[in-house]
Image (spheres, grey):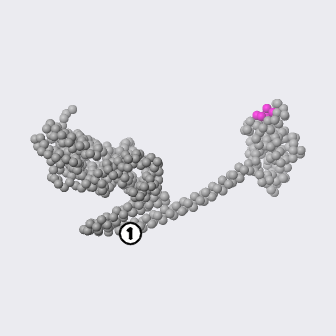
C-alpha cells in the first residue's frame, strides 16, 4: 500500500477505534508502526516486532519514538561505534519531516524504510527487509564491472586484430601486385597455348586473391573505426559507366549482357566519396555477373531531385540463380553467402556485401535485396547526395528524327529508347529481326522513313536487315551493337555506320547518332 493509503487508513482508524487500526495494520506488507503527535507509539503490526527485534513488553503502545531509537542505537542497529545521543538527536529531527527515507543495517540485514506525517501531526513508519535486493544489487554491480572489463579487453583485442589485418593485408598486396603484373606481361607475350593457359590461371587466381585481401583490408578498417568518407565533387554517370565498362570487358559468357540505365533527367555531378560509390557498384555488379549464367544484369540509377539534392536509388537487377528466402536476412553479414555450396562453386569470402552494408550505413543510406530462386535478384541502395558544379556532357538535338531499335534484351532497348527520347527522337522498339525488317521496309516506302537503326549485330538474320537495298535507296545508317565476349563484328563492317560495345556509354551512343538529321520534315501536331 502507498503512504497516502496508510495515512487515510490511520485517520479512519481513529474515528472507528483502535481495534480497527490494529486490524488494518495486520494486513499491511512489511513492518508498520503508528505514532501520535507526541511521537508515542499507538499501534504496530506483528511484522514490526519481528523485523526490529524490539522487546514488545518494554516498548509497546505508549513508548516514545526517542526511546525506541535509543534502544536500536545502543544495540548497534545504526552501525558499530556510533555516538548514540547524536544519532538519536539526528533522527528525532528527521522524523519530523513530512517524508523521510532511511536505511540501516541490523545484525547483517539491510532494512529500508520511510516515515510520513499524518494530517493530525502523528507519524507513520514503514520498514522492510531489503537484504536480498541489496545483495542482488551488489552482484549486479560486480557483474557490470566484470562485463565492462571483458568488453574493454575484447575491444582492445579486436582493435589489435584489425590493425594486424590492415598491416598484413597491405604487406601481402605489394608482392601480389608484382606477381599479377609480371604474369600479365608474360601472358601478353606468350605464344604457346599451354603456357598461355597456365598464365591465365595464375592471373585469375591472383585477381581473386587480391579481391579477398582488399575486402579483408576494408573490413579491418571498418572494425578499427578508420572508415573515413571523402566529400568531393564527382561525376556519378562517369563512375557508373566506367565500372560497367570494366566489368563488361571481363564477361566471358556471350549470352549475358550488362545494361546501364541512368535516368537522363538526373544531374551528373554530386558531392560525395567517388571511391566508395565505385566500390559499391563493383561489388554489386560483380556479384550479379558471377551468379548470372544467361540473360542480363541491369545497373539502374534513378532518383528524385529536390532543393539541390538528389535522393538516389541505385539498383542491380539480374536474371541469375536467385537467393533462397531463408538466406536473405543474413546475406549482408560477414562471411555469409547464399548457402554453403556457393563458396565452393563461385568462390569469394562472403565479405563484399557486408562491406557494402557498412559503406551505405556510413553514408546514412539503406541497402536491401529482393530475390526469387531461379528468377534472379535485385540489390539496391539509396543515399542522398548534394549536387555539385561540373562540366555537363553535350546533348545533341534529335528532334524530328526517327529511330528503330532492335535487341532481344528488353532492358537494353528501354535504356537506349529513354535516352534518345530525352534528346527529342521518336523511337520504335522491336525484339526480333523479321518484324524489324518489315517495319523498316514499310517506313522506307512511306513519307516517314527511319533516320537511323540501332541493332545487336549478333542476332540471327540481322545481316540482311543491315545490308539490304530498300525502297528507292532509302536505307538509313545502321549502328551495330556487340559485346566484348562475342567480339566485334569482322565480316561486312562496311555495312555499319558505327560499331559500339556493350554496355553502352552515353557519349558513344549519342556521338554515333548525333550527326543524323531528319530526312523529312517533322510532323506538326
Q: Which element is circle 1 on?
A: helix
Work out whether residue 218 can be spotted: no
Q: Nearer the viewer, residue 211 or 96?
A: 211
- The relative height of residue 109 versus residue 522 in the rendered view (above or below) is below
Work out whether residue 15 can be spotted: yes
Question: In the rendered structure, does residue 364 fall within the stretch colored magenta?
Answer: no
Left or right relative to 452: residue 167: right
Task: Tell me the residue at 35%/68% (across/down).
Answer: 179
- The relative height of residue 81 versus residue 260 in the rendered view (above or below) is below
Q: In the orientation shown, which residue stands out farthest toward the right?
A: 57
- The relative height of residue 343 versus residue 302 in the rendered view (above or below) is below
- The relative height of residue 484 versus residue 434 in the rendered view (above or below) is below
Task: Tell me the residue at 33%/64% (across/down).
Answer: 201
- The C terminus lies in quadrant: top left
- The N terminus lies in quadrant: top right
Left or right relative to 156: residue 479: left
Q: Where is residue 2, by image quadrant?
A: top right
x, y percentage for residue 158? 52, 61
Task: Tell me the residue at 43%/58% (across/down).
Answer: 349
Which residue is under mark 1? 175
Q: How many marks?
A: 1
Q: Nearer the viewer, residue 8 or 219?
A: 219
x, y percentage for residue 369? 42, 47
x, y percentage for residue 305? 36, 43
Magenta span: predominant SS is: helix
Q: Nearer the viewer, residue 35 or 450?
A: 450
Q: Nearer the viewer, residue 40 or 178?
A: 178
Task: Tell me the residue at 39%/48% (across/down).
Answer: 322
x, y percentage for residue 209? 39, 63
Using a 10 Å C-alpha cutoff, classify the residue at mark 1 as few (fewer than 14 neighbours), some (14 to 19) or many (20 or more): few
Q: In the orientation shown, which residue stands out farthest toward the left?
A: 472
Query: What segment carries the magenta color?
Result: 8-14
Amino acid at each position: 500500500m502507498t503512504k497516502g493509503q496508510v495515512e487515510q487508513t490511520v485517520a479512519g482508524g481513529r474515528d472507528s477505534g483502535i481495534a480497527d487500526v490494529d486490524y488494518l495494520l495486520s494486513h499491511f506488507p512489511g513492518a508498520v508502526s503508528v505514532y501520535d503527535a507526541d511521537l508515542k507509539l499507538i499501534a504496530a503490526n506483528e511484522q514490526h516486532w519481528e523485523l526490529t527485534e524490539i522487546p514488545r513488553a518494554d516498548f509497546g503502545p505508549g513508548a516514545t519514538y526517542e526511546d525506541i531509537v535509543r534502544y536500536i542505537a545502543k544495540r548497534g542497529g545504526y552501525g558499530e561505534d556510533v555516538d548514540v545521543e547524536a544519532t538519536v538527536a539526528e533522527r528525532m529531527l528527521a522524523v519530523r519531516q513530512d517524508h523521510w527515507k532511511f536505511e540501516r543495517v541490523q545484525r547483517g540485514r539491510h532494512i529500508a524504510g520511510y516515515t510520513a506525517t499524518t494530517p493530525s501531526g502523528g507519524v507513520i513508519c514503514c520498514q522492510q527487509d531489503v537484504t536480498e535486493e541489496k545483495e542482488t544489487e551488489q552482484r549486479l554491480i560486480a557483474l557490470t564491472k566484470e562485463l565492462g572489463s571483458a568488453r574493454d579487453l575484447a575491444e582492445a583485442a579486436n582493435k589489435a586484430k584489425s590493425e594486424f589485418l590492415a598491416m598484413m593485408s597491405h604487406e601481402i598486396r605489394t608482392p601480389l601486385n608484382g606477381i599479377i603484373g609480371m604474369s600479365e606481361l608474360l601472358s601478353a607475350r606468350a605464344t604457346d597455348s599451354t603456357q598461355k593457359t597456365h598464365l591465365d590461371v595464375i592471373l585469375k587466381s591472383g585477381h581473386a586473391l587480391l579481391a579477398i585481401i582488399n575486402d579483408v583490408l576494408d573490413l579491418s578498417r571498418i572494425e578499427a573505426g578508420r572508415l573515413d568518407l571523402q566529400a568531393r565533387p564527382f561525376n556519378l554517370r562517369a563512375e557508373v559507366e566506367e565500372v560497367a565498362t570494366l566489368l563488361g570487358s571481363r564477361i566471358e559468357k556471350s549470352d549475358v549482357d550488362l545494361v546501364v540505365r541512368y535516368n537522363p533527367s538526373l544531374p551528373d555531378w554530386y558531392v560525395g566519396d567517388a571511391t566508395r560509390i565505385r566500390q559499391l557498384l563493383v561489388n554489386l555488379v560483380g556479384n550479379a555477373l558471377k551468379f548470372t549464367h544467361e540473360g542480363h544484369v541491369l545497373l539502374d540509377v534513378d532518383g528524385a531531385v529536390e532543393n539541390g539534392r538528389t535522393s538516389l536509388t541505385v539498383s542491380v537487377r539480374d536474371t541469375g540463380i536467385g537467393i533462397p528466402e531463408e538466406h536473405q536476412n543474413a546475406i549482408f553479414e560477414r562471411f555469409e553467402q547464399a548457402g554453403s555450396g556457393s563458396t565452393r562453386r563461385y568462390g569469394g569470402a562472403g565479405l563484399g556485401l557486408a562491406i557494402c552494408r557498412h559503406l551505405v550505413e556510413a553514408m546514412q543510406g539503406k541497402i536491401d535485396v529482393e530475390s526469387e530462386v531461379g528468377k534472379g535478384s535485385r540489390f539496391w541502395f539509396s543515399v542522398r547526395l548534394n549536387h555539385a558544379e561540373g562540366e555537363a556532357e553535350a546533348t545533341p538535338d534529335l528532334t524530328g528524327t526517327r529511330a528503330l531499335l532492335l535487341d532481344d534484351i528488353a532492358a537494353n532497348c528501354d535504356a537506349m529508347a529513354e535516352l534518345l527520347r530525352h534528346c527529342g527522337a521518336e523511337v520504335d522498339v522491336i525484339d526480333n529481326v523479321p518484324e524489324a525488317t518489315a517495319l523498316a521496309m514499310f517506313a522506307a516506302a512511306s513519307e516517314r522513313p527511319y533516320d537511323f537503326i540501332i541493332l545487336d549485330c549478333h542476332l540471327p538474320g540481322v545481316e540482311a536487315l543491315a545490308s539490304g537495298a530498300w525502297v528507292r535507296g532509302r536505307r538509313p545508317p545502321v549502328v551495330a551493337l556487340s559485346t566484348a565476349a562475342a567480339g566485334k563484328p569482322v565480316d561486312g563492317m562496311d555495312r555499319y555506320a558505327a560499331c559500339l560495345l556493350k554496355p553502352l556509354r552515353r557519349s558513344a551512343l549519342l556521338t554515333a547518332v548525333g550527326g543524323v538529321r531528319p530526312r523529312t520534315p517533322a510532323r506538326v501536331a
